[in-house]
Amino acid sequence: MSIPREQYAQIYKDNNHPIEYKKVPVPKPGPDEVLINIKYTGVCHTDLHAWKGDWPLRTKQNLIGGHEGAGVVVAVGELVEEIKVGDHAGIKWLNGSCGHCEFCMAGDEPLCEKALLSGYTVDGTFQQYAIGKAVHVARIPKEAPLDAIAPILCAGITVYKALKESNVRAGQTVAIVGAGGGLGSLAIQYAKAMGFRVIAIDTGSEKQEMCLKTLGAEEFVDFAKGDIVANVKSVTGGLGAHAVILLAVSEKPFQQAAEYCRSRGTIVCVGLPPKARVSAEVFSTVIRMITIKGSYVGNRLDTQEAIDFFARGLIKAPFKVGKLSELTKVFQLLEEGKVAGRYVLDTSVSSINHILG
Ligand code: 8ID
Ligand code: ZN
């Protein structure tokens, strides 16, 4: 397999500064790493946080962002045995971890203090050739389309894990807040595949239609219209949802969820609005036995399980395709809340077709 010396990449020179789309050298994998020719990369709201620098965690300088990259392995380091040139594979948020700390040993590698984060502390997938530690690279079955599976590598894994963390059982109801976004659209599909009933919370007719008609939520509550708490209660027999999965990039729902979560229910915080706080009234949290917790991506087993759901044809979420050169435009649309579902970028430069105009 011939590997070029140079490739196109999107580079963040500095937070909030124009992103440079230019040619850079193709990186070389170390002994425990693989080099993947990224065919498609999803654009997660996390990428926008990284470029803006709005989280209390520093990014690498001259960063190549992106962490939902699906492609073909083109080179492997000398210590790599389990994955071969020609295999389909994906780079996800967790690029590497130490393997030795108590969290790694317990299969909680996202909690490893030495974790390497794709498109944040190490270069990610907004380039044609990206590197991942072989033990963390996601294995993608050859039959799976690389464009549709790209969003599974962060959004899919994350929402699948969050739904497991909610302890909801089949037949119970989960409220998905931010349901019309990238994580949300996949959360509806995973929830349904796991036998849960879904109330989608977001805004606008495009997202409403997608959530109800395309993805199969039973109810849609528009957060910009009327009283959310009353509306969620009215569609759940007055008791509220068994679990609330918070995927929104705004603070308000993190302070409201406890009011429409059912007694004994669980609120799972996933979205990461900058400088936001979670809050709930102590008295009712206690006497209604509400659990409030965080959930952060997933481990390697969650990754494989999330991919299995997709490979079995159970996860079908709409996505739009742009070119890698159009990243800045996609960031703008995300910032404005105008992306229903996910954007996936095609990294090939053969057709310089600017789909977004
Ligand atoms: O492991 C994790 N915890 C993890 C993994 C991946 C992503 C966390 N995230 C974080 C991202 O960094 C981001 O903060 O999850 C958040 C959502 O990521 P996304 O799904 O990629 O973002 P999006 O596509 O922009 O979707 C956000 C949706 O939230 C809605 C918007 O309309 C949009 O559809 N929303 C907002 I903003 N305010 C809302 C509100 N008050 C709301 N929906 C309901 N109520
Ligand atoms: Zn992500």
Image (cartoon, grey):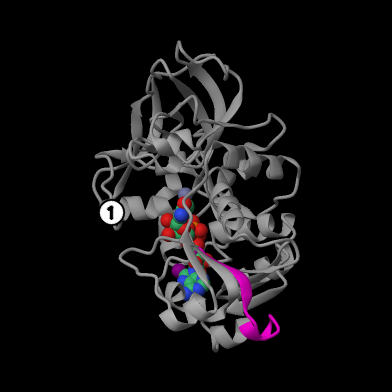
| 243 in the magenta segment | yes
Q: Residue at x 70, y 70 (%)?
A: 212
Residue 85 falls left or right of residue 211: left
Q: Quadrant of residue 10?
A: top left
Q: Residues within 10 Å of mark 1 (few under 14, many from 20)?
A: some
What is the x, y in percent for residue 132? 45, 29
Residue at the location (24% across, 40% down)? 61
Specify start and end residues of the magenta stretch as a single range.
Answer: 233-247
What residue lies at 49% left-to-right and 16% top-to-bottom?
76
In the displayed orientation, state which residue is furthest to the top: 78
> Which residue is the extreme one toward the front?
287
To which residue does mark 1 refer? 53
- Amino acid of disc 1: Gly
Quarter of the rendering containing residue 30? top left
| One can see residue 283 in this view | yes
Q: Nearer the viewer, residue 79 or 263?
A: 263
- In magenta stretch: residue 174: no
Which percent across, then down, holds residue 197? 72, 67
> What residue lies at 69% left-to-right and 40% top-to-bottom?
308
Using the rendered image of the protein, determine whether residue 44 is visible from the camera's viewpoint. Answer: no
Q: Is residue 351 left or right of residue 140?
A: left
On screen, residue 117 versus residue 256, left or right, reads: left
Q: Looking at the image, which is closer to me, 216 or 264? A: 264
Q: Nearer the viewer, residue 134 or 269?
A: 269
